Image (cartoon, grey):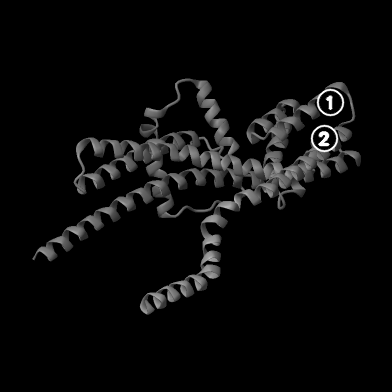
Amino acid sequence: MKAVALLATYGDLNMEMYMIAGLLAVGVALVAYALWGGRDKEHGKVLRRVAGKSKDTAEPKADSGIDQAAKNIMTKVAPLAMKPVMPRSDEQMSMLRVRLANAGFRDENASSIFLASKTILALIFGIGTAVLALKRGSQGMTVFGLAAIIGTIGFVLPEAWLWLARRKRAEAIRNGLPDSLDLMVISVEAGLGLDAAIQRVSEEMAKVHPILSQELVIATLETQMGLPRAESLANLANRTGVAEMRSLVAVVTQAERFGTSIARALRNQADALRVKRRQAAEERAQKTTVKLMLPLILFIFPAIFVVLGGPAALKFIEAFHETGLAG
């Protein structure tokens, strides 16, 4: 009977753990879907503009029932969940929108969903940890401490995810800049204006470097809508958040202001970026030997020692036993 009771208790505990894990997975998936859905939607708008299609002529993709339900849930929950972590000033809110734009999220609801995700994940992680700790028989202060620690981890997770997304996108833009600048130099030297050269580069680089192409398309659209070129390029640098892009925008703006050759400025910038990219690759190659030391020491060297020293150790043990028996 005691064994049956223990098995029943263990089964109930496992069921509760599965339920908590399911809630955590649903919360994370809901937040991730809400953010990535806005990113895909914005990317689709830009692609339609590149192809010369309007919003009305493009065939909209119908959302499934699950997609629509997820959108409705996040739309209703976000205004309430974002209040505890709402930025105190408009400047902080603008900085958050810039960070989201650096990661490729320009949807109007991206900031509210991101802020709401911090509260939602903190509550899910904290409550789930508290329930699990109580079921294991932990005391009040221990439960509170564990819930606070795990809840803080859930609160910080969206920030870490946003940092990784910004870093990945910036790396893709940084890698595509030298090739795009080479094509831009060729276009300018062939007689195209700077705006036409940027548009041509955005079209040619759509498949090779789609992220950079998308940003160049947005800059071209802003210029065509009447925004000054310097301002549209400054917006391009702010959206990407890449230091090399800011440097390029500053060089182009100065060359235009002082009347120097834009083609020469672009060529010098392309050469500098290519050298910098090669130096970064060499730096990563040099760091490889240092990074390999830890897995070598922990995993490879013990296996080598077992292979090389194992037979000798067995012979030594065998000779020791024979000597002991003889004695």
Q: Earlier in the sequence, mark 1 or mark 2?
A: 2
Which quarter of the image is occupied by the C terminus? bottom left
Q: Relative to residue 227, is residue 159 depicted above or below?
A: below
Residue 132 picture location, percent across and down: 25, 47
Q: Residue furthest front?
A: 327
Disc assigned to residue 41? none
Q: How many numbered marks appear? A: 2
Q: Is residue 52 visible?
A: no
Q: What residue did someone put label 2 on?
A: 194
- Residue at horizontal 45 percent and vertical 21 percent from the top: 88
Q: Nearer the viewer, residue 249 or 310?
A: 310
| Amino acid type, label 2 | Leu
Q: What residue did someone put label 1 on?
A: 256
**Helix, strand or loop status at disc 2:** helix
Residue 168 picture location, percent across and down: 60, 44
The answer to which image quadrant residue 4 occupies is bottom left
- Residue at horizontal 49 percent and vertical 39 percent from the top: 160
Residue 182 picture location, percent across and down: 83, 43
Position of residue 294 in the picture relative to residue 232 (left or right): left
**Helix, strand or loop status at disc 1:** helix
Mark 1 to mark 2 CA distance (whole Å): 10 Å
- Residue at horizontal 63 percent and vertical 48 percent from the top: 290
Residue 37 picture location, percent across and down: 50, 46
- Residue at horizontal 33 percent and vertical 49 percent from the top: 23
Q: Nearer the viewer, residue 189 or 124?
A: 124
